Image (tube, rainbow, N blue to C red):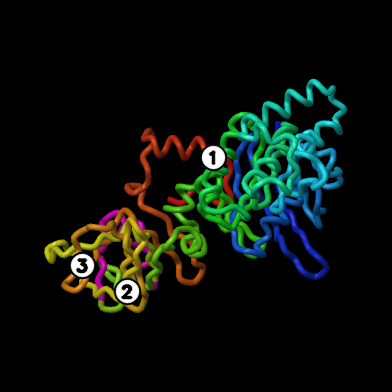
Amino acid sequence: MKSIRFEHIEKSYGKNTVIRDLNLEIRSGERVILLGPSGCGKTTTLRMISGLESVTSGNLYMGGEVVNDVDSGDRNVAMVFQNYALFPHMSVYKNIAFGLRTYKLKKDAVREKVSRIMHVLELDGLQDRLPRELSGGQRQRVALARAAVKQADYFLLDEPLSNLDAQLRVQARKELVRLHEMYHPTFVYVTHDQIEAMTIGQKVVLMYRGDIQMADTPYNIYYRPANVFTARFIGSPPMNIVPGRLTGREVLAGDFHIPLTDPWLKRLERYQGQELLLGIRPEEMRLTMNADSEGLRVTPKYIENYGNRLGVYCMLGDAECIASVEQGSGLSFTGRIFLVIPPDKISFFDPKTEENLGYPVEYLPAEGDALWDAEQKLSGNIHKERIH
């Protein structure tokens, strides 16, 4: 068993508390991403797992045992740092083999393990080079190989791709997933890059100011955000958040009347006459020139070119919104244009707590379809209950 469990964990430096009442369970062999802005506590959380940081209060369980006072060297962890931390005077081979030699393995066993991991990470032929003779991508792969060759129960990574260019990052993400699928360690990865989080993680733990905002599958994090922070942090461009009031069968946002379907009216009936925050992803907002579409007439204010898509900015009430449309859609942005908001793509949030108000059952994935099955397989134990 290689599980990790945080039970009411706090971490303080003097009077400064950086982690507050952290409760989180990571399943054995799970691939988990700690995501959030700088200073949110994600690296501190990782370092507590590794034993490089102590726990101020609460209990940290690894493999079902409390490890608060267990030394880092006795936790069976392998760690990859942001700066790679290679030994500059050692060759590639000796850097990778260094950790194995502490286990006093025979030379033939060390050679076999190092050769295998070098082949997997495409480092063949580089065994005699020093780190200064390698490219950034090669140094990153050596650091991964040095950690992976130990086949430790816990594989911990602290922003290991941040020094690579965009093209190398894409390749490195594939290598990380492949390494995990080969050895199945419990995999905990720290990043502030949401693309890395969504492409690598089976579960994403979004943190802010020492608290978990949401812990769930990438799909739910994106399409069913637990709160406004999650909605705005995830996505590029982020989710549109529009203030409005539920009146009758509509949400009023300035002069705009946004009609609601029966499932939404039933779900939100206790919020009649109250202020709400409406959220919708830019790519889910449809633009049309058809006046019969029952859409909302808007005037484009600004257009961004993303290459394959356009970002069209407009005002919806007092809020600036962005709709993402495909290039070559045939839209004319100098004439009349209408905005259509699909009801099954909307999220609603409480304006005071900024918490998600849930979804009609009709708009959730149905049990038995591929999306539902994938979510159930990947989700495991989550911080917040599934939003419905």
Looking at the image, which residue is at 39% across and 53% down? 359
Residue placed most toward the observer, 109 or 124 = 124
Looking at the image, which residue is at 37% across and 43% down? 365
Residue 268: numbered disc:
none
What's drawn in magenta, residue-wise? 256-275
Q: Residue farthest to the left?
A: 292
Q: Tell me which amino acid carries mark 3.
A: Phe
Looking at the image, which residue is at 35% across and 79% down? 318
Magenta-span inclusion, residue 262: yes
Point out the image quarter for the N terminus: top right
The local secondary structure at tag 2 comes to strand
Which callout, 1 or 2, points at the residue further toward the start of the chain?
1
| Quadrant assignment, res 294 | bottom left
Task: From the top left corner, tell me how far across and down residue 20 is, in percent.
Answer: 70, 61
Mark 1 touches mark 3? (CB < 8 Å): no
Residue at the disc numbered 2: 302
10 Å crowding of disc 3: few (<14), some (14-19), many (20+): many
